Amino acid sequence: MKILVLGGSGFVGSHLVRRLSRDGHRITLVTRHAERCRELWVVPGVTIRQLDPYDEQVLAVELRNHDAAINLVGILNERGFGGAGFRRAHVELVETLIRACREAGVPRLMQMSALNAGQGESHYLRTRGEAEARVRAAEREGALRTVILRPSTIFGPDDSFLNRFAGLLRIAPVLPLARPDAKFAPVYVGDVVEAFSRLLERDRFDGQVYELCGPEVWELAALVRWLRDRLSLRRLVVGLPDLLGRLQGLAFDFVPGKPFSSDNYKSLKLDSLCQSSGFEALGIQPWGLSERAPSWLGGAGKQARYQRYRRQARRERI
């Protein structure tokens, strides 16, 4: 199968491109910054094309003779304020991609979204919902066969989730957390990639939305304290009341790189938990964070190692 991937240079994309290569697919990775994909240049079957994905005509030409398109593009924060950056990355790009797929005759589109898309007050979630609406409309019109994936927070050795908190814990004797009771079910990047692989091979799943959650539900403060202990650090993790949490988000809006923002705060007001199990529908048994993450964080105890070996043996029998 020949597949065009947008967002392939990111965290999930780099894992997915390697997996699709191992599956024997040919991949065209479209990016505006080819130099950021250097580690993928040597992956068999991968062609990296530097172009502007918002240029509909150029994108349509690149899409010709492809069997599917996968859109992984997403941002957690925008450079400015007001939602324009989120709308451009999440909605306008999807609109362009759908039109380009129609023009090029590409029959399938897989869209990475997020849990709670279309809900709440944050620009991030609202624009994710708008993008989903565009994809579902294309499916109803018969223009494309589509699949939408909604993962909870994704973790892995090279993520920006555990690694961000690990970095903060290493430099801050006290770590204040907004929305410390926010709940989510972290999902391992390898399981997300497995879901993409299976959905590509089975078009009977087209037209569906798959929510992807790990088997463990965590509160934010509990997870950060667990991470602190795995790293053998002596740090105080302090949960902030909502007023101070909102002020923290507003203050960080003006910090370069926006490690946290007022929009992030609004997203955390909704628990990132699945209403249905996409993994179960696909026959995938996902890893829990406490089972998988110690393999690269260190500090895993005997019981965690035993659980990991048992799960690995079970997977090998499937």
Image: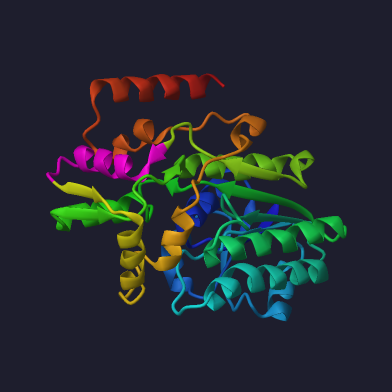
Whether 95 is drawn above or below 294: the answer is below
What residue is rendered at 26% in x and 38% in y?
226
Q: Nearer the viewer, residue 52 or 154?
A: 154
**Main secondary structure found in the magenta portion:** helix
Q: Quadrant of residue 297?
A: top left
In the rendered structure, the answer to whether residue 274 lies left or right of residue 204 reads left
In the image, is residue 233 part of the stretch drawn in magenta?
A: yes
What residue is rendered at 37% in x and 52% in y?
179
Whether 174 is drawn above or below 102: the answer is above
Q: Where does the magenta region start and end?
A: 218-234
Q: How many marks?
A: 0
Percent position of residue 197, x then y: 62, 43
What residue is rendered at 52% in x and 64% in y?
122
Q: Quadrant of residue 204?
A: top right
In the image, is residue 91 part of the stretch drawn in magenta?
A: no
Query: Does the rendering let one see residue 310?
Result: yes
In the rendered structure, the answer to whether residue 59 lies left or right of residue 241 reads right
Q: Nearer the viewer, residue 27 or 219?
A: 219
What residue is rendered at 16% in x and 47% in y?
236
The residue at the far right in this view is 142
In the rendered structure, the answer to whether residue 277 lies left or right of residue 37 reads right
Query: Which quadrant is home to the C terminus?
Result: top right
Query: Does the rendering let one see residue 62?
Result: no
Whether 197 is drawn above or below 118: the answer is above
The way the protein has been coloured in the rendering is: rainbow
Percent position of residue 11, x then y: 45, 56
Q: Nearer the viewer, residue 78 or 56?
A: 78
Percent position of residue 180, x then y: 34, 48
